[in-house]
Amino acid sequence: MDDFDLYARFYDLDFGDRDDDLLLIQEFAARCGPPILELACGTGRALLPLARAGYQVTGVDLSAAMLEIARHKVAAAGLADRVTLVQQDMRQLALEGRFSLAFITFNSFAHLLTTDDQLAALTRIRAHLHPGGLLLLDLFNPDLVLLLEARGQVVLDRVMTDPDTGHRLIRFHTQTVDLGRQILHVTFIVDEVDGQGGVRRTLFPFSMRYLFRGELELLLRHAGFELEALYGSYDLEEFSGESERMIAVARQPG
């Protein structure tokens, strides 16, 4: 079982309404045209709007549970003829055909914890792009002040209601950082409270390796990409040290 299977049933309740990046993705889809590839597609939050807009989209994820939810959503929307879902590791990506645009949203690339893993994934993605095709890579810009404050304290994030069960879901998180390895260790804690006051706790630990600008540029270059632009927001503002996001647009030469 992939680690993210543990969190699959909570994912849409927690992040399904996140849409601040969708317009940016749609703009690049319009620029590049189909077919489109999403890596770490999860439950389909970003690929479903593209399919509704008429694009042919392939979604790849390592989590069987995430993909199962995505399949149900694709079927319910009547989009099975436009969406292909594949369970694969992006480090060993092996799909038929090539794509005009590939994208990875919302820090998912950071779950690759070594340089070898990062380069393996980038190299396989580049091999699946048409000459001139683009990779859109969305990461957080590391804030050293916030990283130094990550000392394992428990933080309340949000309170939700599961529409299927009516149970109240209370999510907390903790964070610690390994500054030497540039790895942020995170645990999501979800307390599920039923109608009788019983509590079931789910712990979902995961890690992310954060990247700095120069490191990201070198990774892309070493993997054979040409960096077209680096933005600091979904509104395509120029990247700076104060930017919240670090959004790379890289081209497959050709």
Image (spheres, helix red, strand yellow):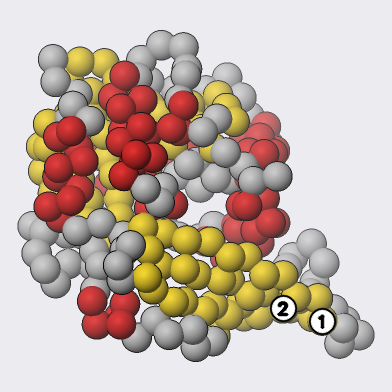
Label 1 element class: strand
Residue 36 on image: x %, y %? 38, 26
Residue 98 on image: x %, y %? 36, 15
Above-or-below relation of 147 to 59: below
Q: Nearer the viewer, residue 150 or 67?
A: 150
Horizontal side of residue 76 vs 231, given as left or right: right
Marks 2 and 1, how far apart at CA: 6 Å
Can I make out residue 80 in this image? yes
- Report if the CB atoms under discs 2 and 1 are less than 8 Å apart: yes
Q: The C terminus lies in which quarter of the figure?
A: top left
Tell me which residue sits at (47%, 61%) in the image: 207
In terms of image quadrants, where is residue 26?
A: top left
In terms of image quadrants, where is residue 163?
A: bottom right
Q: Nearer the viewer, residue 19 or 117?
A: 117
Query: Residue beneath label 2, please?
Result: 191
Q: Nearer the viewer, residue 181 or 161?
A: 181
Tell me which residue sits at (19%, 37%) in the image: 220
Query: Residue beneath label 1, please?
Result: 199
Q: Nearer the viewer, residue 150 or 194?
A: 150
- Amino acid type assigned to the residue bearing label 2 in the image: Asp
Horizontal side of residue 118 vs 212, given as left or right: right
- Amino acid type assigned to the residue bearing label 1 in the image: Val
Label 2 element class: strand
Horizontal side of residue 197 vs 38, given as left or right: right
Q: Which mark is residue 60?
A: none
Above-or-below relation of 34 to 116: above
Instruction: Name which of mark 2 and mark 1 comes first in the sequence.
Output: 2
Tell me which residue sits at (24%, 82%) in the image: 145
Tell me which residue sits at (36%, 25%) in the image: 124
